[in-house]
Image (cartoon, rainbow, N blue to C red):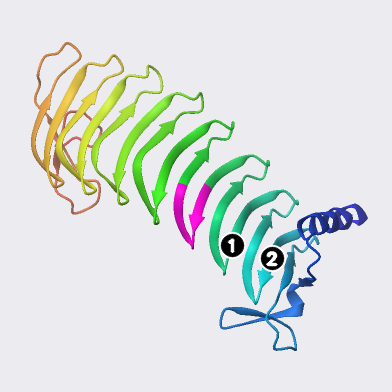
């Protein structure tokens, strides 16, 4: 127990090292979103620290005039870091990072005045990059790159104002071949959608008008055309639909 408390104190001292006073949860009160020192009308300027039941630090944040302003850190119960970020006037502003219980980096994002704005990255359990995309005023913008755990490309999805727009590409993790190439407009399927097998052979082509399927063509592994299959809807009450792939839910 002594060792745990010492570790917690070391974390506090390292994090709160700018000579501002440090307060605990029972020493403050929050009124209309402003944090005050208890039994005073003075908005908190200093560090506010919360603890887990085992007295390991749960959260520590720098406040100025009653609002988070500066670094904030959140910890798992075992003392490992969960979140680290910067705030300005109680809004996320700057780099925000999330970590797993094993200490690995899970997500890295940039914020401006409370909105995601700038780079955004996520990572697999083995540390490999999972996705990378740019946010503009809270919405995805441009190409999102996706990778598997071995670092191979898994998708290239294109966004405008947070919606899929343009040609979306998905790749096989086994061969690297493209397996889907889909056209989108303002978040809806619009245009040609093509599916390929692991060998890169065209197996399906769908045409869409604003999410409504208008035509379908299917090919087998030999390149011969075949009729599509009727399928039940995904949810009860949904109409059946045509697909090039046979499944257990196929309507006879």
Q: Element under label 1?
A: strand
Label drawn at residue 87: 1
Cα–Cα gap, marks 2 and 1: 9 Å
Image check: 23 left or right of 118?
right
Image check: 107 left or right of 212?
right
Q: In the image shown, does 70 or 215 lie closer to the viewer?
A: 70
Dots 2, 1 in contact, CB < 8 A: yes
Residue range corresponding to the magenta coloring: 109-118
Task: Categorize mark 1 by other alpha carbons within 10 Å: few (<14), some (14-19), many (20+).
Answer: many
Rendered position, 173 above or below 22: above
Rendered position, 220 above or below 243: above
Image check: 47 left or right of 67?
right
Q: In the image shown, does 101 or 38 lie closer to the viewer?
A: 38
**Residue 239 percent coordinates (x, y):** 14, 48
Query: Which residue lies at the image location 78% right of the left edge and 68% below the top edge?
Result: 20
Q: Element under label 2?
A: strand
- Quarter of the figure with residue 207: top left
């Amino acid at each position: 127990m002594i060792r745990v408390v010492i570790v917690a104190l070391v974390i506090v001292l390292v994090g709160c090292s700018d000579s501002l006073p440090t307060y605990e949860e029972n020493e403050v009160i929050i009124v209309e979103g402003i944090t005050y020192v208890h039994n005073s009308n003075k908005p908190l300027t200093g560090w506010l620290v919360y603890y887990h039941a085992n007295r390991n630090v749960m959260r520590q944040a720098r406040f100025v005039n009653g609002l988070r302003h500066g670094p904030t850190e959140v910890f798992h119960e075992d003392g490992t870091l969960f979140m680290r970020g910067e705030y300005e006037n109680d809004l996320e502003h700057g780099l925000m990072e999330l970590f797993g219980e094993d200490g690995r980096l899970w997500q890295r994002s940039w914020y401006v005045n409370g909105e995601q704005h700038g780079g955004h990255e996520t990572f697999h359990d083995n540390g490999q990059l999972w996705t990378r995309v740019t946010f503009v005023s809270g919405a995805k913008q441009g190409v999102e790159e996706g990778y598997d755990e071995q670092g191979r490309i898994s998708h290239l999805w294109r966004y405008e104002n947070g919606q899929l727009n343009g040609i979306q590409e998905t790749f096989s993790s086994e061969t690297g071949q493209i397996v889907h190439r889909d056209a989108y407009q303002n978040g809806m399927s619009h245009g040609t959608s093509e599916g390929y097998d692991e060998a890169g052979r065209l197996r399906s082509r769908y045409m869409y008008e604003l999410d409504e399927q208008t035509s379908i063509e299917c090919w087998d592994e030999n390149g011969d055309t075949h009729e599509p299959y009727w399928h039940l809807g995904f949810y009860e009450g949904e109409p059946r639909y045509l697909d090039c792939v046979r499944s257990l839910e196929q309507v006879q």
